[in-house]
Image: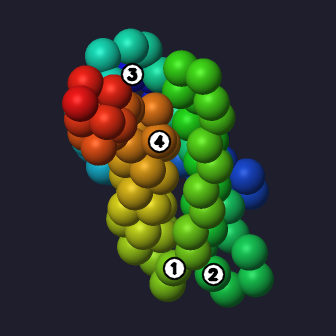
Amino acid sequence: MRIETFGKDVEVTPALKDYVETKLQRLGKHFDQHCEVRVTLSLQKNEHHVDASANLPGQSLHAEAGGQTMYAAIDLLADKLDRLVIKHKEKHLPHASHALRDNG
């Protein structure tokens, strides 16, 4: 999995970059194939804002989060993306009820 981190009017420090990569690594456990995530860190008014696009096999997912600190926003974003990836994965897996109907 490849994670690119960018800043929009915000300097991306090595600590922020490492934090983003650490938090988003858990997305990789859901896929056998390669996926890319592009993360943009920014300040909007007085709120820290994080925006991410994940390019998965067959689809692109997008999530945004805001928080009092950049680290809090990254935590929220990681949770949102994790839920989106799980939801995407469940849509593409055959359901057990379909398998029972087809066999029975």
Q: CA distance from mark 1 to mark 2?
A: 6 Å
- Nearer the viewer's eye, disc 3 or disc 2? 3
Question: Which residue position holds label 3?
Answer: 1
Q: Between tags 3 and 1, which lies in front?
A: 3
Front: mark 4 or 3? 4
Could you classify mark 2 by the number of other residues whose Cα lies within 10 Å: few (under 14), some (14-19), or many (20 or more)? some
Residue indicated by mark 2: 47
Ranked by sequence position, the earlier of labels 1 and 2 is: 2
The answer to the question of whether label 1 and label 2 lie on touching residues, with beta carbons closer than 8 A, is yes
Q: Which residue is mark 1?
A: 67
In this rendering, which labeled residue sits more in front, label 1 or label 4?
4
The disc labelled 1 sits on which kind of residue? Gly
| The C terminus: image quadrant | top left
Residue 87: x and y in percent read: 43, 50
Badge 1 crowding class, 10 Å Cα cut-off, few under 14, some 14 to 19, many 20 or more, is some
Q: Nearer the viewer, mark 2 or mark 4?
A: 4
Residue in the image at 42% along x and 68% along y: 76
| Amino acid beneath label 3 | Met
Answer with mark 1 or mark 4, whichever residue precedes in sequence.
1
Instruction: Name which of mark 3 and mark 1 comes first in the sequence.
Output: 3
Q: Are marks 1 and 4 in contact (CB under 8 Å)?
A: no
Q: Residue type at mark 2: give it.
A: Glu
